[in-house]
Image (cartoon, rainbow, N blue to C red):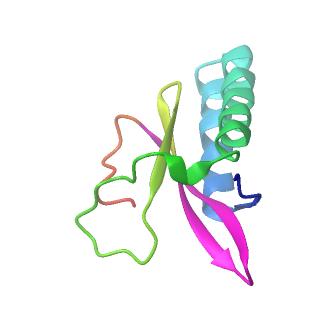
Amino acid sequence: MQDNYGLRYLPLFKQELDLAVTYIAFQLNDIDAANSLLDNVEIAIKNRLNNPESFEPVPSKKDRKHPYYRIYVDNYIVYYVVLEENGQKIMEVRRLLHTLQDRDNKI
């Protein structure tokens, strides 16, 4: 049986996505690539929402109440957790980091 998951985005994720899209569009002068990243991130998150816990959690050096999961999208990684609030499971999207960033100190 498949659970129904709610979806929530943290403000930090939205900020990081906006920074990435803005950088690609205006610093790299590639609006098509920026729009593509935005579309690909949205599609990847919506696809993962069908069963976000069926993937391997991210190994972590930190003790976490909720394990992080990841989605690879182009040169970026979307990080999320699954929470339960009032009997409802929620996929909470927390971070968007470039694959070259120091992820150990960011999540």
Magenta span: chief secondary structure: strand
Judge left or right: residue 46 versus residue 59: right
What's the residue at 39%, 35% (across, down)? 99
Judge left or right: residue 2 versus residue 104: right
Q: Is residue 35 above or below residue 2?
A: above
91 drawn magenta: yes
Quarter assignment of residue 106: bottom left
- The answer to whether residue 10 of the structure is visible from this angle is no
- Residue 80 position in % (x across, y down): 55, 56
The magenta segment: 79-98
Q: Is residue 6 above or below residue 25?
A: below
Relative depth, front residue between 93 and 88: 88
What's the residue at 28%, 61% (across, down)? 60
What's the residue at 60%, 71% (across, down)? 83
What's the residue at 69%, 47% (across, down)? 49
- Residue 27 position in % (x across, y down): 60, 26
